[in-house]
Image (cartoon, rainbow, N blue to C red):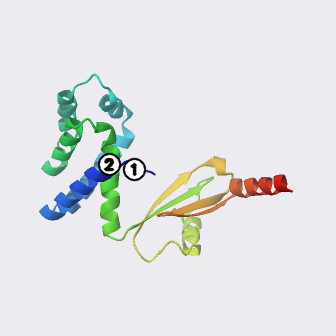
Amino acid sequence: MLTSKVAKRYAQGLLDFTNESGQTATVFSEMKDVAKIMSESKDLNKFFMTPYIDAKKKIEVANEIFKGLSLSSQNLIRLVIKQGRENQLRNIAQEYINKVEDINGVQRVVLTTATQLSNANIEEILKSSNMVNVSSNFDLKVNIKPEILGGYILRVGDQQVDASVKTKLNQVKKDFQLN
């Protein structure tokens, strides 16, 4: 997923601050909560995206929703809203999570399949690929996309293996068109 420059800058600033203040682990956990809340609540996103609601009202609502978070996280959320960047809040939280995971050496793995696979099948796919170091920490996200028809698409960082039936059929189609 592409992340905006705004999200990267806010996340880097937050990471620099939390590293200096020793709050990285706490804020990391809280940013996971923020990302989850923002991705699951369509109403909250609509509220934050509404231009005619002023920043003070948005801050009041955010203070109530995120009142259990540390002062550092609350201050970041308030700052983001004051700057009119509340539409980037989820991206900022996710980018912060990614930066902390990069520091800790956690690989982000995305496996896309046509149907739900068993854990044994997923493990076999990961072991067969030399891109995933199964003995180290990795964060696995499994996506189900029936439009790939079968097979899988494995993405690790910026590398991708596309072993989907749809891609193979498209390649056959392309070969027929060339001949």
Figure quadrant of residue 37: top left
Residue occupying the point 54% across, 70% down: 126
Amino acid of disc 2: Ala
- Compared to 45, does 121 lie above or below? below
Residue 73 appears at what percent x and percent y?
Answer: 19, 49
Q: Nearer the viewer, residue 175 or 166?
A: 175
Q: Nearer the viewer, residue 122 or 158?
A: 158
State if disc 2 and disc 1 touch (CB < 8 Å).
yes
For mark 2, what is the residue? 7
Number of marks = 2
Q: Is residue 68 visible?
A: no
Residue occupying the point 34% across, 54% down: 95
Figure quadrant of residue 128: bottom right
- Cα separation, mark 1 vs mark 2, equals 7 Å
Residue 53 appears at what percent x and percent y?
Answer: 25, 24
Task: Say which element carries label 1.
Answer: loop
In-image side of 45 versus 58 (left or right): right
Residue occupying the point 34% across, 49% down: 5
Residue 93 appears at what percent x and percent y?
Answer: 30, 50
Q: Which mark is residue 3?
A: 1
Q: Which mark is residue 145?
A: none
Image quadrant holding the C terminus, namely bottom right
Q: Residue furthest top?
A: 52
Q: Is residue 61 visible?
A: yes
Task: Say which element carries label 2.
Answer: helix
Amino acid of disc 1: Thr
Residue occupying the point 32% across, 53% down: 8
Crowding at mark 2 (Cα within 10 Å: few <14, some 14-19, many 20+): many
